[in-house]
Structure formats: C-alpha cells, structure tokens
Amino acid sequence: MAVLKFRVYWEEDDVIYRDVLVKHSQNFADLHQIILKAFEFDQKHDATFYRSNDIWQRGREISKEVYEKEYKAPPLLMEETIIGSEIIDTNQHFVYLYDFVKSWSFLIELIQVIKNADADMSLEYPLVSRTEGVGPMQYGTKGMLGEKFADIEEKYDLSEAKEGFGQEGDADQSGEASDDSEEDSDEESEEDSQESSGSEFFEGEAF
C-alpha cells in the first residue's frame, strides 16, 4: 500500500498549512473530509478540487457534485475518483475550493509518496500528520461561540442588564441631587434664622 502525503496551504497565507496522509486507493471525498477536519471547518457547503500545475492554474474539476454552472469539461466526482489515478508527477498540485460564497481556497501539493506503508497497521487513513500556524476561523468569533453564546444572552438578558445598570446610576445621581438640595435648604433656613435674629437685635437696640 502506498500513502500520499499532501501539504495543504491556506491560499492567503502560505505559512499556515496542514500535512495530511491518505492512501493512494482512497478517493477525493476522503481528501475533502480530512482537509476540512485539519482546518476545523464544518462540512455543510459545496466544494470542488481542480487539477493544477506549478503556477496554480485551475484545470479540470473533481467536484463534490455536478453544480449548475458552466464547465469547460464535465467534472469528475469526488466519490468516484481515486486519488492515485490523478497523480501524474511526484509533486502533483491541486487547488481546493470550499464554500462558493466565502470562497475558501487552499493549495495542495504532493510532498511525499510512502511506499509499503502496510508496516504500521495501527494508523487509520486519512489523517493529519502536521499542523503549522493558526488557521482561519470559518465563521469568525461569533460563529465559533455559536449557540452557546446565544443561550447565555437569552438566559441573562444582557441588554436589559445594561439598561438596569444605567437606571441604577440615574437613581444614585438623583439621590445625590436630593441630598444636596436638602443640605442647601438647611443652610438657607439657618441663614434666614440668623438674619431674623440679627434684625430683632438691631431693632431692639434702636428703640
């Protein structure tokens, strides 16, 4: 049994890559699944491979299914196409496109052919053998938190809590204003009392 080692680069940053191992007798659906697993993507979207060359030009497609679009040549299907049958040279290239809306694009290069790999029967292929760099998040931070974050928002009603804090602050300010008003009122009363007493004193002295 021969095992093929592919290096899968994220197209936007080639320092981010994953090495995956597949049997030459496995199909492109297996390669498709292990790439998504390696980059921690889900498997909900459309996908296709392209035969490619050293400068990453896209050739015939090896697709998850036949999509409603124009093809230069009818696509091969992932589940029907054996990976080994598409290996023309020792550094074979493919381009992998996932989620046609987001257009996640990965560059795939064959970097090693391991012959007589039957010696280690404990390994289950396909598998990820190396991880380099922090991969892109498929849906960003919110997508990563998913339903759990929504549950937290609903349980604690963060929007109402925010308003509640604002009202409490207003109440405190109102209370402080009320206290200040009472102090001012007390001071004015005391001053009025002093003025009244002074007036009576001077009036009495005048008479």
Image (spheres, helix red, strand yellow):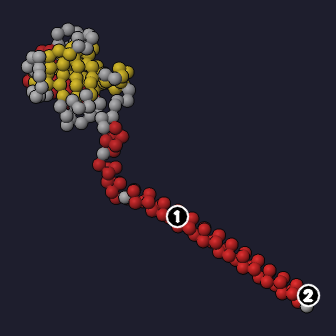
| Residue depicted at 36% across the width and 22% down the height | 13
User: Tag on residue 170?
Assistant: 1
Circle 1: residue type: Asp
Instruction: Please tell me whether mark 1 sits on a helix, a strand or a loop.
Output: helix
In this picture, residue 207 sits left or right of residue 8: right
> Looking at this view, is 163 or 54 the one in front?
163
> Looking at this view, is 47 or 73 the one in front?
73
Locate residue 25, reporting x and y percent.
Answer: 13, 20
User: Tag on residue 108?
Assistant: none
Locate residue 150, reporting x and y percent.
Answer: 32, 51
Please, is residue 113 above or below residue 166 in the view? above
Identify the image quadrant of residue 153.
Answer: bottom left
| Residue depicted at 44% across the width and 57% down the height | 162
| Residue depicted at 31% across the width and 54% down the height | 151
In this picture, residue 145 sits left or right of residue 70: right
User: Tag on residue 206?
Assistant: 2
